[in-house]
Amino acid sequence: MKLHDLQPPKGSTHRKKIVGRGIAGKGGKTAGRGTKGQKARRQIPAGFEGGQLPLLQRIPKLKGFTNPFRVEYTPVNLDALTALGITDITPEVLVANGLVRKNDLVKVLGRGAVTTALNVSAHGFSASAKSAIESAGGTVTEVALPFAVRPPASGNQHQNR
């Protein structure tokens, strides 16, 4: 048996009944749809609910709010800083070691322990991270944000009209 020899078993498939070809034969005139009424007419649109306001129009749209001026930081924990084995840590050092991407705002968080004195410069610190670094004899320097008051609004946000 070859691929071109394959066919369904005899009697399992039927030819589609052709209706609506004049009044001469069976299936003419009303074409099996009965007389009058909505079901005798042409196709009704998908989602039509008999004149009731359709579901797609009833449900609310654009719920919620996205703040275009949100300041988003990339978190770096203390255990990642101690694993580097470097005492002077800046955002550029973190980019070079692959912990953050270029132009990311860095926030140091307090997971992990600091045993050596680290000089850490970042855009933000959690209170626990700041106290852990300073208690180990290190210094904490907050780097100024690259914008004056708030970050520039990104262009892909919804406009209120």
Image: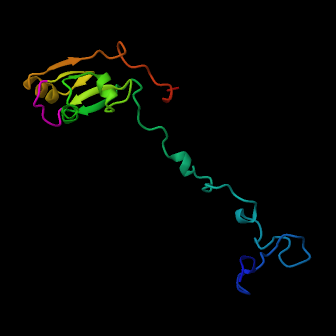
Q: Is residue 156 above or below residue 20?
A: above
* Closest to the observer, 97 or 54: 97
Task: Give the camera-side residue of 84 and 153.
Answer: 84
Q: Which of 3 and 47 is in front in this view?
A: 3
- 126 up-or-down from 2: above or below: above
Q: Where is residue 143 in the image (x, y as percent from the top left)?
A: 27, 16
Asked where in the image residue 135 lies, by quadrant, the reply is: top left
The residue drawn where x is 37% and y is 15% is 147
Judge left or right: residue 45 versus residue 111: right
Q: Which residue is drawn at 15% across and 37% down?
A: 112
Please identify the quadrant where the N terminus is shown.
bottom right
* Side of 155 where 143 appears, left or right: left
Question: Of residues 88 and 70, which is closer to you in this image?
Answer: 88
Provide the residue span drawn in magenta. Answer: 110-117
Image x and y of residue 72, in percent: 34, 28
Q: State how many labels appear.
A: 0
Task: Please tell me in which quadrant of the rendered image residue 148 appears.
Answer: top left
Determine the residue located farthest toward the front in the rendered image: 85
Left or right for 126, reference 24: left
**Going 25% across and 23% down the picture, which residue do you hit?**
124
Residue sticking out furthest to the top: 148
- Residue pictured at 72% horizontal, 64% vertical: 37
Principal secondary structure, stretch drawn in magenta: loop
Which corner quadrant of the image does residue 119 belong to? Answer: top left
13 up-or-down from 129: above or below: below
Q: In this view, does 148 lie above or below 42?
A: above
Q: Is residue 51 magenta?
A: no
